[in-house]
Amino acid sequence: MSSHSYLEHHGMYGLMAEFKHPHELLKAAHLAFSAGYRKMEGYSPMPIEGLNEALGFKRHFVSLVVLTGGITGMLGGFLLMLWITTVAYAHNVAGHPMNSWVSYIPPTFEMTVLFAALSAVVGMFAMNGLPQPYHPVFNVPEFAARGARDRFFLVIETADPLFDAEKTRLFMDELHPMGVFDVEK
């Protein structure tokens, strides 16, 4: 068993570097991505423009899930109204046709919006891996104390193909962080 797989499966989640300023985290993320690291995450108490791109964030398919949910809701709403007016409660009102689609528009629209919104929430939760009541980064006292207030952190995970505990620590030290910490599972 290689040291990489040993660390990944026996207690170490990765290495964490702490920075005082957001531009330092952004620069470190760019350098880590340029060095070939792909399984990394940046933590910041505020949004940092360009951090997602620096970390190599890829688009998820939430928009496709929302579109699928909306189309499902639209078809479901329309077919439900069609079934109700022509089969379940077929009443001829003032000689109008049984399948008068114009009257289906409001319920169809409402079902489209409802299904799209619900699929957006479910899709976002699923693609973000939520709910996640525990994350190993909270095992680092520096992160737990200052991560949500005024410090910026870069974590390179042991799951990264390039991760080697010694080489990655040396690389992170070259980024001139305030400190480099082991992240235990």
Image (cartoon, rainbow, N blue to C red):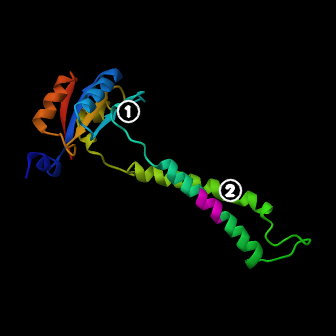
Q: Secondary structure at mark 1?
A: helix
Q: CA distance from mark 2 to mark 1?
A: 36 Å
What number is the disc on residue 53?
A: 1
Identity of the residue drawn at 26% across and 27% down: 31
Q: Quadrant of residue 21?
A: top left
Label 1 is placed on what type of residue? Glu
- Crowd band around label 1 with a 10 angstrom C-alpha radius: few (<14), some (14–19), many (20+): few
> What residue is shown with label 2?
110
Span shown in magenta: 71-76
136 left or right of 166 in image = right
Observer able to see residue 44: no
In the image, residue 113 above or below residue 145: below
Identity of the residue drawn at 40% across and 28% down: 50
Q: Secondary structure at mark 2?
A: helix
Disc with the residue nearer the chain's start (2 vs 1): 1
Along the line of sight, the residue nearer the viewer: 142 or 28: 28
140 left or right of 98 in image = left
Q: Is residue 74 magenta?
A: yes
Identity of the residue drawn at 81% across and 73% down: 98
**Whole-percent x and y of residue 75?**
64, 63
**Whole-percent x and y of residue 147?**
32, 32
- Crowd band around label 2 with a 10 angstrom C-alpha radius: few (<14), some (14–19), many (20+): some
Along the line of sight, the residue nearer the viewer: 184 or 125: 125
**Whole-percent x and y of residue 37?**
24, 36
